Amino acid sequence: MHALIVLLTKTFAFATTVHKDVTERLLRINPSLAAQARKILDINKSERHIRGGLATKDKYMHERVMREMAH
């Protein structure tokens, strides 16, 4: 299920639309599947600040390495 949500988001490049489809429209179509998707989206939301922090750390580490190589 998690891979499907990631694939949809990357495929359509509109995370908000995928989010709306999964949370609202799927609920009307298949409530059980919507509940599973909701759990995954909630986990993703609770972890995204960690991924953002790691991405920022990697960015500045890369810039530091590039500066050191230039000297």
Image (tube, rainbow, N blue to C red):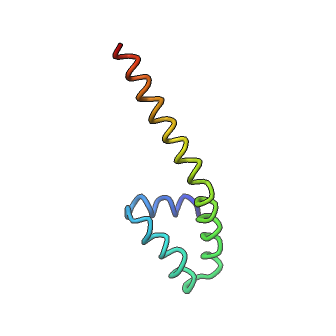
Residue 22 left/right relative to 47: left
- Above or below, 53 against 17 in this view is above
Residue drawn 44% across the image and 25% down it: 64
* Front residue of this view, candidates 44 and 3: 44
Q: Position of residue 12 (x, y in %)?
A: 37, 64
* Front residue of this view, candidates 23 and 46: 46
Q: Position of residue 30 (x, y in %)?
A: 59, 82
Residue drawn 65% across the image and 75% down it: 35
Residue 70 left/right relative to 51: left
Residue drawn 55% across the image and 47% down it: 51
Residue drawn 45% across the image and 36% down it: 59
- Above or below, 12 against 30 in this view is above
Where on the picture, by quarter, is residue 14? bottom left
Q: Position of residue 8 (x, y in %)?
A: 45, 64
Q: Position of residue 7 (x, y in %)?
A: 47, 59
Which residue is outermost to the bottom? 28
Q: Quadrant of the N terminus?
A: bottom right
Where on the picture, by quarter, is residue 15? bottom left
Which residue is outermost to the left? 70
Q: Quadrant of the C terminus?
A: top left
